[in-house]
Image: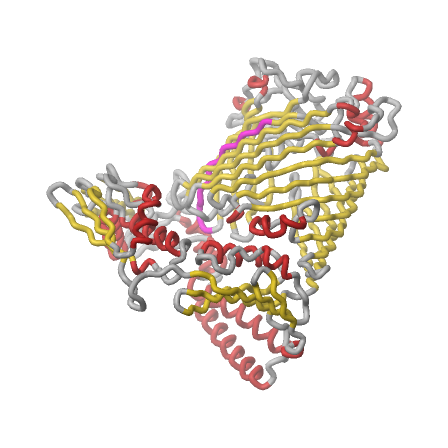
Amino acid sequence: MYACSLSKNLPEGKYVLENNSLEGVEKADKSEIEGLFFQEPNTKIPLTNSSLGVTIYRVGQIFYDSAKVNDRLKAKNSELGDVKTSLNETPDDRKLLKRRDKLQTKIQDLEKMKEYGNFLMRTGNPVTILDSAQTQKTVTEIGNYLYNHGFLDSEVTYEVETKKKKAEVIYAIQEREPYLLDSIYTRSDNEGILDLIKKSQDESLIIKGESYDQSNFTKERERLEDLFKNNGYYMFTKSFIDYNLYYDTTSKKINVEQRILKPSFAENHAVYRIDSITFKVSPPSDAFIDEKQLTNYRNIDFTFYKDRFSSKILSSRILFDEGQEYKRIDIVETQKQLSNLDLFRYINISFDTVGTSLTAKILTQPNQKYQLTNQLGLSITEQLPGPFFSIVLRNRNFFRAGEILEFNTRIGYEGVASATDQGVYQSREFGTSASVIFPRFLIPFYGEGLQKFGRYNPNTRTQLGFNYTNRPEYTRSGLNGLLSYTWATRGNRQQFTLNAADINYIRTPKISPDFTQVLLDLQNQGNNLIWSFLPSFISSISGQTIINFNDYGNYNSSNKASLLKLFIESGGTTLNFVNATSNSEATDFARFQWLKFQADYRRYLPLNQKSTVAYRANIGIANPYGVSNGILPYEKYFFAGGGTSIRAWQARRLGPGSYTPPIGERGRYDYAFEQPSEMILETMLEYRRNLVGYFDMAVFVDAGNAWVIGVDNSRPGADFKFDRFYKEIAIGTGIGLRMDFNFLVVRLDLATKAVDPSMPEGERWVLDNISFNRLFGVKGQTVLNFGIGYPF
């Protein structure tokens, strides 16, 4: 342990920072103050004086030679200079351009290595040695924080306690009473601005009776700037908003005077209106300068060159009109909506002013007509990784009205859990499709709806596809036709998808003898799952909405965020209007009708800069009816267990209900078969914390199960009952290690079963199987999950 000790080879008079502590914090936010420490102690391995991060850093130092890095950096800079000189003579030389780009990338990497060390040094961190200058900076920063949060009379001191080679810094804070805002007055000669402030008073961030907070004044200036710019005040900026604060040191109160300053370029702030709008698509080169085409639609002057674009489509994405008051939010949203068309390299919107009139100029350049994208990657759906290769060919502006013709092909090999064994096998998948994406609602909204719905980024996708899957148990292929509508609200807070027609013809030409026997045995017990593998024509109508609160998915954000996903589907709906034959034992071509609903809620709560809490709740129900005769298409069933579900159970092996699956020769948890279900309930709670560098840890608890609707004689206890379902909730818990490289997250989760609903009542608590002699419990009780990305 001494070899990895933090205090190894520490010079005389130097101390390892062991801990920072705060005293006297009563009303201020302690976690925010702790985030102001300029020095943080190294995260230590429990019961030791060593740190994983420091060990990694020291290993990196062994292989790091700063002199060599400097020499290589100097040589590459010299070579780059020579390449640039050559490019001055032959600027279109592709080899030189390629070499220049490679050298620039290499120089950036070397500069990073010079400043932060090699990869291991950047992954780990050096020993934190107490630095009095950094400690004094922390005191100053805490004092500034307290002052800016209303504690104007506060004091901050510190004390250092040392023991051997370790030091603890104790920051002592005297908060004293915070200053409160007493009165707030706005001074301005502009009646229009005063009226806007009055009408939006409820949204003000400066509130009488609250503690003084400097950040609220900053946010209020930004809010007022947005308010004014969205109401015609084009030339207004937040620099015209000024505050005078009058302090009463006796009563600890502050009187606020908010001043709207006059502009230097005019007598008063004026409201601006759009006088005219021009939209110019720059020619791809000077060779097309004579192919100019001018057109006017909706009082917008369009200029096109070689590629012709639909003025109707483009105008539907321009969210401001001639004669309208200037609104910054409409300009920003117009830029987003035009970018969403994926037709242009850039969108630049500028304004010329004459008096209080604005000439809006939209300048763009066409994107490349054809785009070929290749992707080689790694996907993990169950336990083992598998490579995939995809190729996408796009033809932009296919019908000259913004359409995109897209051909997509994907080949993949993935590790999946066998449906008839607990092992993991290779699954081969192939899929190809041809799509046309229309930047509008195609049917039946094309006419009047074009302008009406343009602000919602409407798209219609028509698609024909073929999919092939080769699993150990069966080979399955399908033809697919899709008519889908998508749209979103401003800022993509709400995204909607309506699959108006999703039509599939599915065949299962090959089923292994073992799986066939399983299906026949189930049929003999009254479970006709075998119908799911007959040739079938499956059609459905479905809708999905995703509501994203505060940019969920940006895990680097310090803000709370959540996401709600709702999905509803009606399958075989058209069979309600014809006299279709129900599935039976004589069926050789299956038909299905079903209703399906699923709700998935996720929440992300940052605790501080290094740790967060995340949780998820997922509930779903799929009810077969009519000609289905109690059976769903196999892909429409729910499955519980696996790396993104209840992690203590093998993929698709949990449940249903309290049913005890047949146990194999390898122990209590050798469950051979997948367990399709018609209901699912899952909840997951996870604590995440950064350990060092790219390494994060997690502690989690998962709870849930899956059930069938109605009695399944082949699986006793599988049916959902209100009087017992809560007794059938499986619980798993565990720890995880994640490597977060920003562009990629590699995840390892070790989960163990705590409550097993397949055991008899009174024996379902199985966590006590774990002991020093059996760290992982009985065989199969603990499961290792390997995944890409966060589980939710």
Question: Can you say whether 560 is above or below 130 in the image?
Answer: above
Q: Which of 671 and 769 is in front in this view?
A: 671
Is 286 left or right of 257, judged from the image as shown? right
Comparing 607 with 66, the one in front is 607
The answer to whether residue 27 is left or right of residue 572 is left
Q: Residue at 32% x, 54% y: name it.
A: 10
The residue lying furthest to the bottom in this view is 89
Q: What stretch is highlighted in magenta?
A: 681-693
Can residue 1 be seen in this snapshot? no
The secondary structure making up most of the magenta span is strand
| Above or below, comparing residue 199 to residue 754 in the picture | below
The residue shown at (68%, 40%) is: 499
Is residue 422 shown in magenta?
no
Frontmost residue, 554 versus 699: 554
Residue situated in front as seen by the camera: 106 or 478:
478
Q: In this view, does 432 lie above or below 294?
A: above
List x then y, in percent, for residue 171.
23, 45
- Colour pattern of the rendering: secondary structure
Position of the N terminus by quadrant: top left
- The residue shown at (83%, 37%) is 507
Residue 82, picture quadrant:
bottom right
Q: Which corner quadrant holds the C terminus?
A: top right
Assess whether residue 688 is covered by the magenta stretch: yes
x then y, percent, for residue 29: 30, 41
Task: Identify the residue shown where x is 57% and y is 15%.
Answer: 763
Residue sitting at the far left? 250
Q: Can residue 744 be seen in this view?
A: yes
Location of residue 582 in the rendering, given as x and y in whole percent from the top left corner? 82, 24
The location of residue 190, given as percent across then percent down, is: 29, 56
In the image, taking residue 153 as reference, residue 351 lies left or right, namely right
